[in-house]
Image (cartoon, rainbow, N blue to C red):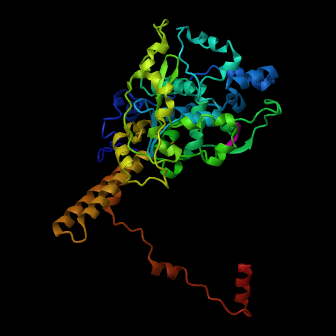
Amino acid sequence: MAANNAYQLDPGPLDASVLTGQLTHRSRDIWIGNDNMILNTRKCDGKFWDLVNEHLIHPRVLDVIKLSGLYGIYRSHRPVIDRSLITALVERWRPETHTFHFRTGESTITLQDVEILYGLPVKGLLLADTSGGLLKLMYLPMLEDITTVGSYSWGSATLAYLYRFLCKASQSSQNEIAGFLPLLQIWAWERVIVLTPQIVAKRDTRNIFPVGLPRGPHAARWYAHFSWTDTTKHVLRVFRDALDSMTENQFIWEPYSSDIIESLPKYCRVGRDIWRARVSIFCWDVVEVHLPDRVMRQFGLVQAIPSSFAFDATHFNHDRRGRSNTNWELEHAQWLHFWNHIDQYVWNAPILHGSLRYDDPYLIWFRRITRFIIGNPISSPQQQQGYVPNATTYETMVRHIHLMVNKAISLGENPSMEELYGFRAMVRDEGSNCLAYVQEADRTYVQADYRREELMSDHLHPPIRRRGKGGVAGRKVCAIEI
């Protein structure tokens, strides 16, 4: 698409009071055509799954895995990570709110997702050590008594760690992401229809999981064979454009019905009473905030304009380096209060009936404070090979039409001649800008003639005359109808 100065689409935010880190966010570089980098994904569990695929785990080891609270991860196996899909999601993650900013509103991975998808316990002790040990050794003290390993809140620690790396990766200076990425990818498959592959058959797991094991969590259903007929894979530009143009009916706010939740193993719903807790979550030096009050539609509740949480928006720049002797339990004392009194911070709201209207106060507020569109195909037209995104063009056209409709409504039933002349000029200008934006400016020089002439159509296709049943023509018609 050729560049055109007739209309400069503002991707937002129109109000910068919430997304205060826009200048360093990777979406800024994407908009000006400087960054189409696909993030590298760090992982350290590849060899483990190779062993699982080749050898059955010994029953005594399985007993330990079940006691640890990590059984759900083993039972779900690991999906092939799509780096382009992960990158497209990171582009919409905001460290200021710990949510993804989609066209339809804010959404995020919650304690509910962690427990339902992977069965990781969300209730339990905090992972805040006092040893100041090295990263690779800091888990060893927790393994001294195997029977107590499952008492830790592995779910909140996993989520905190993923939040931290989402925040880091969202910065334009970063080129990789770590954390529990299977959770991120399957969370997206559960909710974002335009990203979801179709499951065509379950994988045969008889050679991997012995008979008689407890059922797996909800993520286990994604260990399957997929069809990509209606969706793509490994194409960042397509993923980005799909999210840029996503509509309300293409996002599933509540993928886990009450029937699904009740049908899951008990270990997938033990912590349901704290799924909506607005609290700090920890993984040793990492402290993040869990903000379900920003995504209440994920729980079937009414979404109000959220209040801010007193938290440093650049928190992800702090790490363990140079602080090997730090007592993290004391360091995070002010945040530990929230977790230690978690029952007091469970958020509630009225039940939501239906979907939010476009003129809902929350959505009106959200559209002003969000980054509405990520991709900008006209920023670098010379590089547009292959798939050309449509979301920016679509949004520009919609805004032009919206302006004209609003103006027509404001004129009322009896506009003056002066107002009509002004409206005619506006329609001409806005319409011309639309055509120019999609490289159809030449159409302004010819008459718009798109309506079929009914009389001519009837002349070309006269009605069929049918004789009675005894005639030849009648027998032919009957044969056709049969």
Q: State the image coordinates of residue 181 (x, y, percent, origin top left).
A: 58, 29
The span picked out in magenta is 223-227
* Left or right position of 261 against 172: right
Q: State the image coordinates of residue 21 (x, y, percent, origin top left).
A: 36, 29
Quadrant of residue 157 in the image?
top right
Q: State the image coordinates of residue 164 (x, y, percent, origin top left).
A: 49, 24
* Left or right position of 113 against 384: right
Q: State the image coordinates of residue 441 (x, y, percent, origin top left).
A: 34, 54
In this view of the protein, which residue sits in the foreground, 476 or 80? 80
Residue in the image at 37% along x and 40% along y? 370
Residue in the image at 63% along x and 29% along y? 120
Residue in the image at 46% along x and 37% along y? 100
Q: Quadrant of the C terminus?
A: bottom right
Prevalent SS, magenta region: strand
Residue in the image at 67% along x and 14% along y? 143
Q: Is residue 116 above or below residue 50?
A: below
Task: Based on the picture, tell me whether residue 225 belongs to the magenta stretch.
Answer: yes
